[in-house]
Image (cartoon, grey):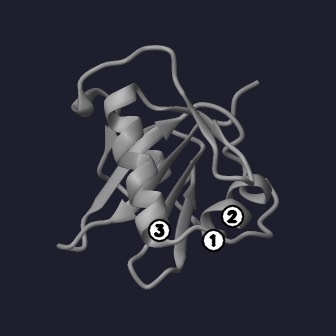
Amino acid sequence: MSTRSAIAYEDDNGNCVGVYCHFDGYPSHMFPIIKSMQHEEVKSMVETALVEGGLCSITNETVYETYEEKGAREQWLYTSIFAHENNLDYTYFKRKDGSVFATCCDGREITHDSKY
């Protein structure tokens, strides 16, 4: 079963720019990876995935695989930091200050040790 999420970064205007990620979106997997990445790494990964067609998953080595369908950037773009607004299990938002803000499917903020 897939744990669907969006991985996003904060742009220069404070907006959320995110992309769909199909697998392994649960907090115990994603938080350590997203927290360890620099803001520019997350931005680069998201922007590449928006052109390539989303993410299948990411690993601890920050290697990612693109989802099988390539499409227009807008097809994979998420602009909300709230998972419930995106109809996803989780949303992870890398802020410019390096922190990670995350929400679950009911709109609550979560932390790396959240149990769901």
Q: Residues within 10 Å of mark 3 (few under 14, many from 20)?
A: many
Whether residue 110 can be seen here: no
Task: Decide which of 6, 35 is in the foreground and name it.
Answer: 35
**Which label's residue is closer to the chain start, 1 or 3?**
1
Q: Which quadrant of the figure has residue 97?
A: bottom left
Q: CA distance from mark 1 to mark 2?
A: 6 Å
| Dot 1 and dot 2 residues touching (CB under 8 Å) | yes
Residue picked out by circle 3: 94
Identify which residue is drawn at 40% across, 25% down.
53
Amino acid type of the residue tagged 1 in the rendering: Lys
Q: Horizontally, is 101 left or right of 1 in the view?
A: left
Identify which residue is drawn at 72% across, 46% down.
59
Q: Which quadrant of the figure has residue 10?
A: bottom left
- Residue found farthest to the top: 69
Q: Residues within 10 Å of mark 1 (few under 14, many from 20)?
A: some
Q: Is residue 51 above or below residue 94?
A: above
Amino acid type of the residue tagged 3 in the rendering: Lys
Q: Which quadrant of the figure has residue 14?
A: bottom left
Name the element at disc 1. Answer: helix
Whether residue 35 can be seen here: yes
Task: Decide which of 77, 110 is in the foreground and name it.
Answer: 77
Q: Is residue 15 above or below residue 91?
A: below
Q: List x then y, in percent, for residue 40.
A: 41, 67
Q: CA distance from mark 1 to mark 3?
A: 8 Å
Q: CA distance from mark 2 to mark 3?
A: 10 Å
Residue picked out by circle 2: 31
Amino acid type of the residue tagged 2 in the rendering: Phe
Number of numbered discs overlaid on the protein picture: 3
Residue picked out by circle 1: 35
In which quadrant will I find the N terminus?
Answer: top right
Q: Residues within 10 Å of mark 2 (few under 14, many from 20)?
A: some
Name the element at disc 3. Answer: strand
